[in-house]
Amino acid sequence: MKYNLQPSLLSGAVLVSALGVMWLGHLLSNLQPDTMVVRKLDIAVTPPPPPPPKTQNVVEETELVMQVEGSGAAMTMADLSVEPDIQVPKPDMPNVKVTQTQWDMPDIELDAFGLSELDSKPTLLTPVKIRFPKRLKKQGIKRVIVKLDVIIDEHGNVKLMDIVENPHHELNKEIMRFVKASKFTSPYKEDEAVKARFIWPVIIEA
């Protein structure tokens, strides 16, 4: 009986040892730490920009911000080039002599009256004698109307102020000669001899 219990105890001890080893292995497997995965990252490094090229002329660059009144954002003006201060000598001005032109201005008769202001219209006392140019006759022109700005003084003498209308300038000399030789009756205003100024239409016939 003593010899039969020893193998049984030995087998039980072996079985208990085996179970203990299995239980310990299971426990150790559950206690393993978490695995950390480390990945390699490739970072591309941008090379620095090349230095600006060297120039002989140095231009100052500035940025101006101009605030515009009213609605809207500010207007930015960038890259304003400031040129160096260059002094340009002033050219010598030539000495030009300016002479005053003497203009023959007709006398303005402020005391002359119009025809509507006179007691009656002056009457021409001399005949109308004007030489008609041959060139106008050859062109078939036989009648010309001119308008003259004239002044008649208190004695009826005529003064030509201007040739207002004359389609044929060949008649200018004859017109001036004719006016100089013409004479009117004295113009009157309120029974007093006065000067009169008016436009005198003259009909010239060949």
Image (tube, rainbow, N blue to C red):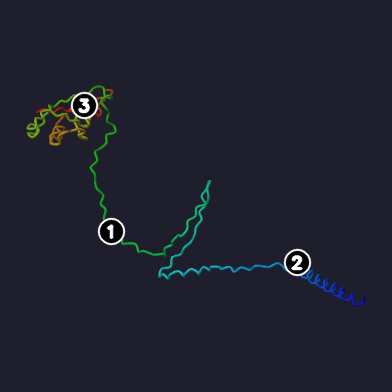
Asked if residue 48 is positioned above or below residue 158 in the image, the reply reads below
Q: Are marks 2 and 3 in contact (CB under 8 Å)?
A: no
Query: What residue is disc 3 on?
Result: 186
Specify the quadrant of the image occupied by residue 30. bottom right
**Residue 45 pos. (x, y %):** 53, 69
Asked if residue 8 is positioned above or below residue 98 in the image, the reply reads below
Horizontal side of residue 158 vs 56, given as left or right = left
Amino acid carrying mark 1 in the image: Asn
Secondary structure, mark 2, is helix
Identity of the residue drawn at 14% across and 32% down: 178
Q: Depth check: give the residue in front, 205 or 1.
A: 1
Earlier sequence position, callout 2 versus callout 3:
2
Query: What residue is disc 1 on?
Result: 95
Query: What residue is disc 2 on?
Result: 30
User: Marks 2/3: CA distance?
Assistant: 149 Å
**Residue 67 pos. (x, y %):** 52, 52
